[in-house]
Image: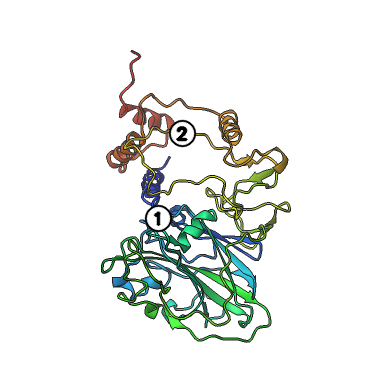
Amino acid sequence: MPFSKIATLATAVAFASKVACHGTVTGIVADGVYYQGYSANFQYMAAEPVVVGWSTPQNQGNGPITPDAYATSDIICHLGATNAQTSAKVAAGGTVELQWTAWPESHHGPVIDYLAPCSDGDCKTVDKTTLEFFKIDGVGLIDDTTVPGTWADDQLIANNNTWAVTIPSDIAPGHYVLRHEIIALHSAGETNGAQNYPQCFNLEVTGSGTATPSGTLGTALYTADEAGILVNIYQTIASYLVPGPALYSGAANSSESAVPAATTVAGEVPSSSAAPTSVVATSTLPVSAGIIAPAGSYPTGAPYSNSTATRTKKTKSACKAKTKASTAVSVPTFASSVTIPTASSTPTAGSDESSSTIAKSATTSSATSSKIPSGTTLDTVLAWIASFYTEHKDTAYSGASVARRQHARAIIPRRVPQ
């Protein structure tokens, strides 16, 4: 493996361990069509996929935008965000469902959605600082019977980390930026303690509406000391006003009931409960290539399954999950294609049968297997990769594969059978 790829692998693995605690939107379903969102892992790929989510490669920590940055462009679509290069199509009055990775249960707060029309025609080049957003959805405190209360984000978590928003039926057709956001208030009792997690997506809205609501610049949506931002949620709250401008008069009431399952996938194929029996792995599938899945299937962004069906088992938040300092790892062998069982033969997700079936499949389908020495940990692997790269990055090889193998063995102490 070239040294540059080894270094990239080490960086990607380290990055993956840093983003577990705060969520991100892996994809959206617009009028039944699944569209992949942006992932910070894209920057490690030779060619980044074209997706509907705005790019935020600087957000490697998957962290928040805090009130001291409300006047900067980062509050608009997150840290250093740049335009998405394609759009999801949705009819006015239709539904957009946003599928999150696991959101931490301790990060209570409102969920808010905005739209802003694009002056450039397709949102691919629009200056984000000129976008004027009008609020189409905003849910805050739902029940304060037990402090800190039940919030919109709790509703999102209960709905399998998914949020559905309705596009106003009266707005004029055209291209818009959808700004979707969770504001975490667990530390908002102190100045600069609120945490904003905005993300943006390009939409092409169809229909015959004529309304063109006025909006607010992204850098003027919030102030650091407004009541919905500077608030102590660990005491009884008589009422809570969702931050930002007033809700657009034509906005529909937020509904978190199940929405129709996606039947088409735009772009890369995500995992689903019922998918074609054979899927060939590819990283160059054009975004325009819609793939029809069997009726009733529900594609979601791998590796997270976000069906809107009611969850029967509550999962721990990523931030609360405890991990050991060193975790033993195994290195699987990957095939060039993946065979997915049909719906009739797929066990129920989350069941013991499903877990054992997957484990057996992973064991038996490997073309070859490599036994990892006892005691090998993730830290061991990363340390070896780092030392190998540092010591040998300037080594000139003659091209002989034997030389490479000998070179690698030379820096690894042989294990003597005990």
Secondary structure beneath label 1? loop
Q: Is residue 49 visible?
A: no
Residue 27 picture location, percent across and down: 54, 59
Q: Is residue 119 left or right of residue 144?
A: right
Left or right, residue 303 beside residue 30: left
> Residue 54 at x, y = what percent?
48, 66
Residue 121 lies in quadrant:
bottom right
Q: Label 2 is placed on what type of residue?
A: Val
Above or below for 240 versus 337: below
- Type of the residue with mark 1: His
Residues under numbered marks 2 and 1 in contact, where contact means CB atoms less than 8 Å apart: no
235 left or right, relative to 205:
left
297 sits to left or right of 139: right
Q: Residues within 10 Å of mark 2 (few under 14, many from 20)?
A: few
Residue 158 placed where, x, y %? 52, 54
Q: Residue furthest top?
A: 418
Look at mark 1 in the image and give the residue it sits on.
22
Say which residue appears at 35% left-offset and 14% top-offset: 417
Element type at marker 2? loop
**Quarter that holds the N terminus:** top left
In this view, 329 is above or below 142: above
| Residue at (43% x, 49% y) in the render | 317
2 vs 1, front mark:
1
Q: CA distance from mark 2 to mark 1?
A: 26 Å
Q: Nearer the viewer, residue 123 or 135?
A: 135
Q: Is residue 353 above or below residue 300?
A: above
Q: Quadrant of the C terminus?
A: top left
The residue that mark 2 highlights is: 331
